[in-house]
Image: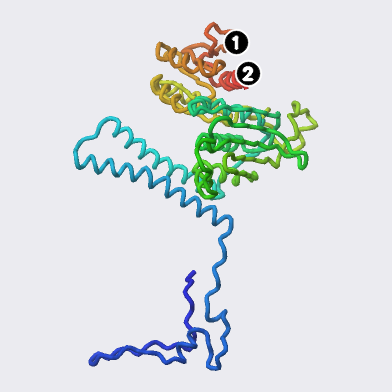
């Protein structure tokens, strides 16, 4: 809407200059100027609502949040792109770039690209078009699963986790919950130093489950404490904005308390199944909700499939379609190693014919970090299933002829054993 003041009704435009003789500049009389300023001929002020624009309303909390996000996006894009532009300028001037410079250029462009991806995710969540299916999900198991998935990154940052997790279940969309927890871990990796305290507990009233993360964002030896604006800029990363928007989309209250050295983030789950409940009997099935214990126990779990044959990948995808899993597919052990270097999945299903030295090295590296990591080998023929607990290799095996019937139950059995 145009915020310029409207012209008074009695204002007249200046006369148009003649086509043949120059006109002197038009000087309106003093009375016209006074009336234009809202002062009548009698010296009294006219109605200010007609003559003066209203004071702009202060921005709402939601507007302020988007303003902060736009500012953060600008910072996330400007810094790497400026550095990349300087490298490109040097390259065009000298015609040379070394391997380290080329790697830095790639990383800077990738940072800008990642900022664009985060913006797309936040915009999609804020659009209101995200479909969610609430089901009964074990919050504590999902938290543990998300932490296990990011173990390598957490250790690489030198962080120590102190956990106090009460077993609780909530009603939520399983895949959205897993994405929410991953965003919380990403924010923690952005800002945390030293020990991170993680707690899952329940309020006395109302009886809502809570996830609390307390971390130190500033080392005691950093000198004088930063001001509130500098602290907010340090904590309001793109991962924080993604976490905030995911919580809003899920309808979960999110609170953050900050002081000069520490920050506390609390997520509250209004739809809480007060405690871990036993298996539902026939009378309980009329309560009107579905149970992830019965329908999708692994919803949100991440499985990597390593298979060179397209028909095998199709069979595995179709067999697990209704399980709510996050599935990724690669065609070789080299691609699998590159994938796992970025972050470990919860399980790896692999084609037996690809097993060799490269696979053994990959499996040994993973099991040094996660000794109970789940591997399921798909042999070329057969219709049997062999659990990891009785296998000589410590890995589950099933025949390719039984993928449709045995793979879903094999995944449930093997992953439930370690969760």
Give the secondary structure at mark 2.
helix
Task: Check the image and name the residue furthest to the left.
Answer: 94
Mark 1 crowd level (few <14, some 14–19, many ≥20, 10 Å Cα)? few
Front position in the image: 195 or 381: 195
On the question of residue 318 being in view, the answer is: no
Q: Earlier in the sequence, mark 2 or mark 1?
A: 1
Position of 191 relative to 73 (above/below) = above
Q: Image quadrant of residue 247? A: top right
Q: Residues within 10 Å of mark 2 (few under 14, many from 20)?
A: few
Residue 310's disc number: none
Location of residue 178 by image quarter: top right
Q: Secondary structure at mark 1?
A: helix
Residue lying farthest to the right in this orientation = 283
Q: Residue furthest top?
A: 392
The quarter of the displayed image where residue 197 is located: top right
Image point 55% across, 91% down: which residue?
43
Closest to the observer, 343 or 120: 343
Name the residue beneath numbered marker 2. 417
> Where 348 falls versus 272 (above or below)?
above
- The image shows a total of numbered marks equal to 2
Q: Is residue 283 visible?
A: yes
- Residue 37 is situated, as x and y percent measured from the top left of the image, at 49, 84
Residue 342 lies left or right of residue 57; in this view the side is: left
The C terminus is located in which quarter? top right
Residue 215 appears at what percent x and percent y? 58, 35
Q: Label 1 near label 2: C-beta < 8 Å?
A: yes
- Residue 211 horizontal/vertical position (percent): 65, 36
* Residue at (55% x, 15% y) in the render: 371
Q: Which residue is mark 1?
A: 389
């Amino acid at each position: 809407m145009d915020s310029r003041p409207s012209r008074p009704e009695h204002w007249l435009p200046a006369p148009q200059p003649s086509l043949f003789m120059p006109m002197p500049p038009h000087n309106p009389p003093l009375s016209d100027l006074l009336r234009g300023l809202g002062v009548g001929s009698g010296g009294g002020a006219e109605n200010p609502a007609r003559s003066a624009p209203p004071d702009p309303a202060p921005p709402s909390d939601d507007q302020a949040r988007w303003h902060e996000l736009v500012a953060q996006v600008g910072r996330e894009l400007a810094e790497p792109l400026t550095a990349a532009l300087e490298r490109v300028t040097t390259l065009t001037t000298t015609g040379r770039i070394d391997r380290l410079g080329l790697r830095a250029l790639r990383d800077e462009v990738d940072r800008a690209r990642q900022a664009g991806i985060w913006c797309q995710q936040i915009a999609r969540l804020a659009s209101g078009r995200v479909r969610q299916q609430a089901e009964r999900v074990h919050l504590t198991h999902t938290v543990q699963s998300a932490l296990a998935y990011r173990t390598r990154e957490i250790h690489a940052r030198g962080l120590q986790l102190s956990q106090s997790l009460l077993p609780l279940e909530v009603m939520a969309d399983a895949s959205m919950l897993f994405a929410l927890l991953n965003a919380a871990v990403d924010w923690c990796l952005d800002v945390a130093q030293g020990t991170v305290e993680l707690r899952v507990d329940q309020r006395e009233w109302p009886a809502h489950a809570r996830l609390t993360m307390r971390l130190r964002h500033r080392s005691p030896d950093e000198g004088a404490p930063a001001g509130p604006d500098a602290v907010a800029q340090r904590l309001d990363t793109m991962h924080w904005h993604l976490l905030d928007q995911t919580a809003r989309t899920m309808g979960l209250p999110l609170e953050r308390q900050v002081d000069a050295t520490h920050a506390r983030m609390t997520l509250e789950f209004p739809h809480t199944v007060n405690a871990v409940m036993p298996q539902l009997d026939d009378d309980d099935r009329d309560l009107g909700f579905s149970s992830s214990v019965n329908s999708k126990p692994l919803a949100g779990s991440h499985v990597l499939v390593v298979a060179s044959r397209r028909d095998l990948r199709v069979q595995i995808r179709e067999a697990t379609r209704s399980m709510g899993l996050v599935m990724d597919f690669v065609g070789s052990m080299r691609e699998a190693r590159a994938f796992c270097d970025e972050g470990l999945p919860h399980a790896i299903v692999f084609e037996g014919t690809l097993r060799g030295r490269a696979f053994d090295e990959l499996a040994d590296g993973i099991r040094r970090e996660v000794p109970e990591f789940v591997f399921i080998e798909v042999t070329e023929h057969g219709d049997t299933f062999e659990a990891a607990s009785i296998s000589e290799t410590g890995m589950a095996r099933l025949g390719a002829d039984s993928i449709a019937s045995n793979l879903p139950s094999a995944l449930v059995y093997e992953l439930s054993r370690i969760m």
